[in-house]
Amino acid sequence: MEKPNLDTLGRNLKQLRMARGLSLSQLANDAGIAKSNLSRIEQGDGNPTLETIWRLAVQLNVPFGDLIARIQAPLGEDGIQVRLIDQGTDNPWVDVYWMSCAPNTCKRSQAHNTGTVESITLISGELHAGVETALRSMSAGDTHTFPADQPHCYQTADRWATLVMIITYPKQEPL
C-alpha cells in the first residue's frame, strides 16, 4: 500500500478506536495482532494485510469500508485487488466493492460480524464462491448471496475473475 493510503488508513483506524474508548493494547489483543504493529498502522507505517484490516473492522464493529474510506487505489495482495466503490449511510450499512482475482487464486475470508451478508455478481471469468462448506460455481452474470458471518472464500480457475461485491451489515440499534 502506498504511503498516502497508509496515512488515510491509520487516521481512520485511530479515530474509530478512540471513538470506542479502546486502548492500543486492547484492540491489538482483541484483533490478535501485536500492539507495535497496530501502532505502526495508526502512524501510517507498516504493511497490513487485507485480513488484518478485516479483523480490525470486525473488532471495532464497523464496516470494512469505514477503515479504507477515502483510499482511491485498489488494495491488494496475493492476487486479489479490492476497491471500495461506495458506502451507504442508511441503517443497515451497505458497502459496494469492486474485486479482481488472479488465476488460480484462493482467497479465504474469516467470518464477519454476526448477521453480515455478501452478495456478489461475477462480471468476468469463472469463480467458486460462498461459505467454505458450500461453494457455488459462478459464470459471468451470475449472482450469489450468502451469509458472511461464516468463513467463506473466493476461488478462481485458470482465468482472472472480476466481480462486484455488496456487503450488507446487520441493522444497528440506536445508542
Image (spheres, rainbow, N blue to C red):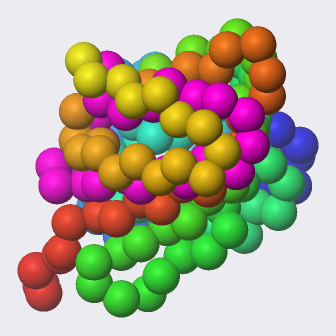
Magenta-colored stretch includes residue 150: no
Residue 30 found in image quarter:
top left
Asked if residue 41 lies left or right of residue 143, the reply is right
The quadrant of the image that shows the N terminus is top right
**Camera-side residue of 70 and 93:** 93
Give the dominant element type of the magenta stretch: helix, strand or loop.
strand
- Residue at 79% x, 28% y is 160
Q: Position of residue 83 (x, y in %)?
A: 71, 54
Q: Residue at x 67, y 14 (%)?
A: 157
Specify whether residue 111 is painted magenta.
yes
Magenta span covers which residues? 109-132
Please name the residue shown 26% across and 54% down the image. Answer: 116
Pinpoint residue 109: horizontal percent, then vertical percent. Answer: 42, 28
Point 58% across, 29% down: residue: 127
Residue 24 appears in the figure: no
- Between 87 and 27, which is closer to the camera in this rendering? 87
